[in-house]
């Protein structure tokens, strides 16, 4: 498996005053380094954990600093659906994921 792709809405997630890089190029570099570090671009895409309290879809969640990387492990390349702050309200996260296809 080679790399990952970002869902178009992943770049527009609301981060507020959180210190995630906001310029798309910086965000891509941040993600690329992070994905390598946590082996999400490896042949083991199931490395993340599922969250049945947030979605019934077969998505995986991977913590990265204060963030959750939400991705579809069955997509090739991996599809990153969202990059969310870990302290976000679970109901907001569930609603966001429900609407994101």
Image (cartoon, grey):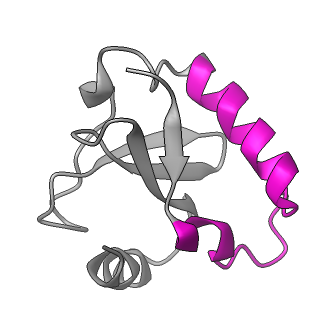
Q: How many marks?
A: 0
* Above/below status of 76 relative to 22: above
Name the residue at 32% across, 36% down.
76
Q: Nearer the viewer, residue 87 or 27?
A: 27
Tell me the magenta residue range: 8-36
Name the residue at 15% across, 61% down.
57
* Above/below status of 84 relative to 76: below
Residue that extends furthest to the top in the rendered view of this protein: 43
State the quadrant of the C terminus.
Answer: bottom left
Q: State yes or no: residue 59 in magenta.
A: no
Name the residue at 85% across, 74% down.
17
The location of residue 98, given as percent across then percent down, is: 27, 80
Horizontal side of residue 98 vs 61, given as left or right: left
Q: State yes or no: residue 20 in magenta.
A: yes
Q: Is residue 67 visible?
A: yes
The location of residue 86, given as percent across then percent down, is: 54, 59
Q: Nearer the viewer, residue 65 or 74?
A: 74
Horizontal side of residue 73 vs 36, given as left or right: left
State the quadrant of the N terminus.
Answer: top left
* Above/below status of 59 relative to 54: above
The location of residue 30, given as percent across then percent down, is: 76, 39
Name the residue at 74% across, 45% down.
28
Identify the image quadrant of residue 8. bottom right
Report the predominant secondary structure element of the magenta stretch.
helix
The location of residue 13, given as percent across then percent down, is: 62, 75
* Above/below status of 57 relative to 89: above
Horizontal side of residue 82 vs 18, given as left or right: left
């Amino acid at each position: 498996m080679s790399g990952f792709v970002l869902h178009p809405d992943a770049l527009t997630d609301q981060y507020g005053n959180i210190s995630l890089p906001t310029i798309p190029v910086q965000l891509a570099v941040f993600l690329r380094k992070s994905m390598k570090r946590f082996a999400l671009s490896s042949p083991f895409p199931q490395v993340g954990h599922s969250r049945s309290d947030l979605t019934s879809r077969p998505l995986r969640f991977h913590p990265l600093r204060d963030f959750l990387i939400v991705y579809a492990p069955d997509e090739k390349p991996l599809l990153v659906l969202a990059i969310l702050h870990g302290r976000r309200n679970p109901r907001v996260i569930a609603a966001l994921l429900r609407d994101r296809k």
